[in-house]
Image (tube, rainbow, N blue to C red):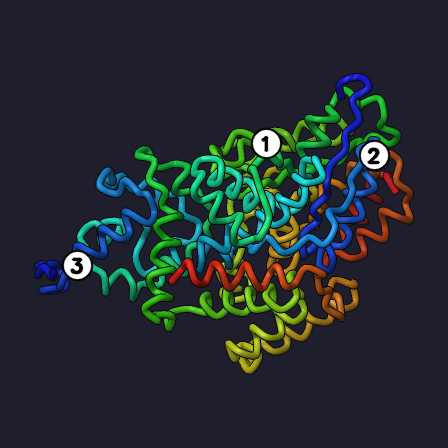
Amino acid sequence: MTVRLVTQQGTESADPAFTREVLGTSHANLERCYQCMACSSGCPVAYAFDYAPHQLLRMVQLGLKDRVLDSTTYWLCASCETCATRCPNDIPIVQVMDTLRHIALREGRTQQTGLPLFHETFLSGVKSNGKVFELMLILRYMLMSKDIFKLGELPKNIKMGIDMFTRGKLAILPDRIKGLANIKRIFQQTERENG
Amino acid sequence: MAEGKALKYAYYPGCSLEATAREYDESVRASARLLGVELVELEDWNCCGASSAHCTNTGLSHALPARNLAMAERQGNDLAVSCAACFLRFKQTNHDLRADDALRQTIEKAIGAPYQAKTEVEHVLSIFARQVGLEEIKPRVKKPLKGLKLAAYYGCYLVRPPDVTRFDDPEYPMVMDDLLAAIGAEPVDWTHKVECCGGNLLLARTDVVARLCDDICQAALDAGAAALVAACPLCLANLDLRQTVGVPIFYFSELLALALGASTREVNSWCKRHIHNPAPVLKAQNLI
């Protein structure tokens, strides 16, 4: 079922099933939000979002699925939990952000920021070694995101690489755990659960 | 420490402590040795999944920590964790599995091992400050850190979410300040104890991380601190690599070990691994 809503941006379609899914999956009592803005006032990353947290919550309440999922907010959220700690209505806002990320991944909406690529790179390392091999994580992310080709950033990145190497901050070889079969099984089982 | 009570833990260093934060691992182990706390590294531990697991797949964010928790449970030891980010993932997993038995059974199936959710999880900062205890630490201080003004930085995951970590006051924690005071240093009152360093934006949005870290470092300077003190390898990496203010950052364990009698050579070998070498701050007070 789709509902047509007149908003400041004109007529938008609203999807009540989307609201229900976010509420159900995050166990969030989202209807309690009365826009006090405690979340947005304390959010250290809000300045970089396109919608502040309280705005995003209202958009989820209204079922504005496309506008919510096209937003950068839930990817850039650093999961610092300041908002949820201060929310007078105990809304688990970070779990709402997680649920939005999961829905976006399921629907292939990952174009907004470098974060989906970062998470994928991070977890593929865990899947192959059972641990994070930081040097490979950094190199692989910089290559896949093409950040390595940003010439303006290159001197800074090279200096940082040298600083880390000369201080012995980067292991050169990966460490692989013995129970890797166990880790692969965990990935298989949880991917299946995730549908 | 209650008399006669030996403190023994399964120790989970976490991935960063094998590379970018080796000095954190070494100084935690040195502090434990000097305080008679036995840390036995959990054999064949795996990554906790960090933010990337909970951002993409809830089941994975429970199962990866649970494999480690189950191994500790089989040994009958509680888990000591150095990284604040890993610490929260373990706490969150226990919190969720204890509240939902069906979930616990699903996760047992995923890890292929029983887990009753009985393993208690504690951060090493709290083990030293609370289980050993400040009153036990004070008489063991060989080198009081006199004249050292420090900003204790807790970041996010030790204190938030408070009902999961149950660590300290989520807005103005004191446990690290109290520990620093017990070893003779002067913790300052300041504004950014629990502000976020940018966490998992470390590679994808270095601009955001730089801005947050500069705010934190500037606030520490404004409060009169000579250095920041951290208890998380991710916080320290972000602060040390991305700030432009030029404030050095210690791991709390480096200072604890120094006060308890770690050698100047050892302390220098830790300091040298920081991007902003904090040794001059110690030299200025004739501590090394």
Mark 1 belongs to which subunit? B
Mark 1 neighbour class, 10 Å CA radius: few under 14, some 14 to 19, many 20 or more: some
**Residue A157 image offset from top left, x and y in percent:** 63, 73
Residue where numbered disc 1 is placed? B189
**Amino acid type assigned to the residue bearing label 3 in the image:** Asp
Q: Residue at x 78, y 36 (%)?
A: B256
Tell us which disc is closer to us: 1 or 2.
2
What mark, if any, has residue B259 been given in the picture? 2
Q: CA distance from mark 3 to mark 2?
A: 61 Å
Mark 3 belongs to which subunit? A
Left of A131 or right of it: where is B194?
A: left
Tell us which disc is closer to us: 1 or 3.
3
> Do the residues marked 1 and 3 share a common chain?
no
**Residue B280 image offset from top left, x and y in percent:** 80, 49
The reply to whether residue A41 is in sight is: yes
**Depth check, front residue: B224 or B176:** B176
Q: Residue at x 38, y 55 (%)?
A: A47
Dot 1 and dot 3 residues touching (CB under 8 Å): no
Mark 1 vs 2, N-terminal side: 1
Instruction: Report the quarter where the C terminus of chain B lies.
Output: top right
**For the residue labelled by badge 3, is the local secondary structure a helix, a strand or a loop?**
loop
Q: Is residue A144 above or below residue A176?
A: below
Residue where numbered disc 3 is placed? A15
**Residue B23 image offset from top left, x and y in percent:** 77, 51
Mark 2 belongs to which subunit? B
**Depth check, front residue: B162 or B139:** B162
**For the residue labelled by badge 2, is the local secondary structure a helix, a strand or a loop?**
helix
